[in-house]
Amino acid sequence: METNGAAETVDLSVTIAGKRLANPVGVASGTFGYGSEYEDLIDLDSIGALYTKAVTLEPRPGNAIPRIVETPAGMLNSIGLANVGSRRFVTEKYPFLSQQTCAVIVNVAGTGEDDYCETLEYLEEHAPLWGYEINVSCPNVKHGGMTIGADPHQVESLTAALRKRTRRPLLVKLSPNVTDIAVIARAAEAGGADALCCINTVVGMLIDTKKKRPVLPGVTGGLSGPAILPIGLAAVYRTARSVKIPVIGLGGIMTADHAIQYLMAGATAIQIGTANFVDPNVTGTVLSGIRDYAAAQGLRTVEDFHHLMD
Amino acid sequence: MEHRTVLVLSNRQIAKDYFELTFAWPERVQAPSPGQFLTIRMSVSFVPLLRRPFAFSRFDARTLEAALIYQKVGPATAILASVDTGDSLDMLLPLGNRFPVPQPGRRPVLVAGGIGMGPIFFFAQELLQSGVKPLLIVGARNVAFTPSMELFDSVDTIICTDDGSRGFAGTVVDYLRQHAEKVGADAELYGCGPTGMLEALAAYSTESGFPLWVSLEQTMGCAVGACMGCVVSVRGPAQYARVCTEGPVFAAEEIVWKQTAQRKQLT
């Protein structure tokens, strides 16, 4: 590969809550398992941050099948937070994750404040990693997830309760399925969040006209993929202008240009989700594209991207 | 598993809507086994978005050629049908588990329905090469959907069509029930095809006592075990198993058929 002299002077490391990420390109929760699944395909050390599959206190089998369906330039999923639960996370997943050099951020989900707190306490004690991403935005569960994330009072209360239980970076992942994401963002900030992740999937549905029923058994699912890029960008743009803490952008990023748009909208880092399914090497491609753009534009840090539209 | 760009050697129609695509096996990649699959990125644009899974239908260790058989049914497979010799394809391969070898003393009976023929043909070839002669039963709607493969010359092959336009008139399970003498007393069954056929085959397995292995399909996200999207319903506390990594081959007795009956959505 051709080396660009200018690109080497670009420092793309970012800092969140005083802790460093080697680069701003992360892999989104739910699309990358617990990391080991992709070990054969990509160099995990090259990832800025690995956000794990959601961990709940008890194991969850997940939702009825089918769970995914392709949509125009996107996909709908209704996985239902299928995961091994906190105890097996500690015994089966933590040993591998703790060996990684990239930042590992554990996505924590629950049904109410008590079990979110219990899960986080358990992880703090048995599986200390880089930080936590609090999932208050899953659209595919009856309790918890988005039902909490749509209510600023619950978001603030939950964030404050979790804040008391960890000094590690606490990121809150927000839903786009709200009237004004800035209200929820400010509630999380008031509760003590270190950063916000925008956005989780967008509620959507698809109907099978032959069978005359919704394609997904739970009727709706979460839309992801390039179809939601403009929704994520608008959410990040608004959120970044509503809070003082860093915003991590995700939603529909397939290319370096998409990621650069998020950085220009105000994101300090980004996450790549559905694109991992399409191209397992996408994180590397996106990172080198960001580096090339920074070099070509004379940008030295991620912060510089934030002022490009000033 | 590896992520490679592979060279297409041929892409020819073998029956109504069915095509066989052959490609050069990439260097330093573990040889595929019958039952395993690959995924292909269908487009560099975002429609269709997700990679599509296809089972291996052949592998020649001498010429290092591999093949898959697909049905042209939707936009993604229409793109595949337009691929020419010399084109390249973006593949993840090989993925998933394989058909287990038959237990000692058991005779393999391989049952294919429709486009499920690919992995069954591959397994038949592997068995032949290891000196085992399987019984091969291929079911289709009608003669138009039945290919003529070289394989049929060297394996005891029964073609079944729903309308009787080629071979036995009836389903593959009708054939098994009516031809106990052909099946023998020590069969081990292997099936790939529509879920309805596999469910009927599972019922036959239960009543006959012959063990049955099935290769299943489900709409796939990552294909590497990360997304939990491609699950099927199984017995036991986990309730679901991933087709991409715990399958695609399962013991039929593990499967909860009622919940698995919903067909995949991707074409």
Image (tube, coloured by chain):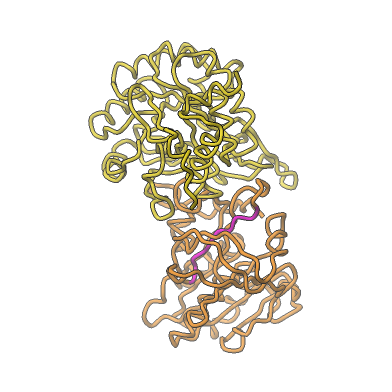
Of residues A113 and A99, the one nearer the viewer is A99
What segment carries the magenta color?
B34-43
Task: Note whether B101 is above or below A254 in the view shown.
Answer: below
Q: Specify the chain shown as orange.
A: B
Side (left or right) of A91 relative to B173 = left
How far across and how far down the image is residue A36, in percent? Answer: 37, 49
Residue drawn at point x = 49 percent, y = 68 percent: B35
Instruction: Classify B135 as above or below A194.
Output: below
Q: Is residue A288 visible to us here?
A: yes
Q: Residue at x 57, y 59 (%)?
A: B90
Reply above or below: B179 against A273. below
Asked if residue A158 lies in the magenta stretch, the reply is no
Write down the colour of chain A. Answer: yellow
Residue A68's quadrant in the figure? top right
* B160 and A173: which is toward the camera: A173
Q: Where residue A16 sits in the image (x, y, percent)? A: 38, 24
